[in-house]
Image: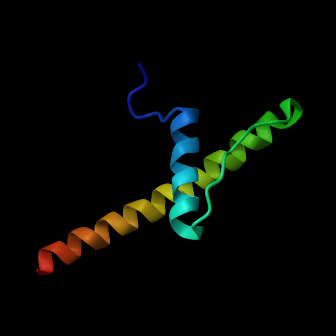
Amino acid sequence: MNIGVPSIAHKIAVVEQYIYKKKGVKVNIVFNNPFMLDQHFRDLDYAYLIANEENNRSREASEEDEKKV
């Protein structure tokens, strides 16, 4: 059991949800080229980092708004 290490499926789900929330477009991330798996994983890690940072900022802003009320 890897606690604290997100699985590939989790990263894909977070990135897909982020894109839907940000752009209103449902996407399905697929790794379709076995020769570029390394690049696919790097791109997914980068997108996951962006999505995670944005989600954390949104969560912090919501918590600050709740404290003000």
In the displayed structure, 23 sits above or below 51; it is below
In the shown orientation, is residue 32 left or right of residue 19? right
In the shown orientation, is residue 62 left or right of residue 13? left
Residue at 84% in and 30% down: 34
In the displayed structure, 45 sits above or below 1; it is below
Residue at 58% in and 51% down: 16
Image quadrant in which the C terminus is located: bottom left
Q: How is the image coloured?
A: rainbow
Residue at 30% in and 73% down: 61
In the shown orientation, is residue 64 left or right of residue 26? left
The image position of residue 6, as x and y in percent, is 48, 36
The image position of residue 37, as x and y in percent, is 79, 34
In this view, the residue in front, 5 or 30, is 30
The image position of residue 25, as x and y in percent, is 62, 62
Residue at 58% in and 43% down: 12
The image position of residue 3, as x and y in percent, is 38, 28
Image quadrant in which the N terminus is located: top left
Q: Which residue of the protein is positioned furthest toward the bottom in this rendering?
A: 68
In the shown orientation, is residue 31 left or right of residue 59? right
> Image quadrant of residue 33?
top right
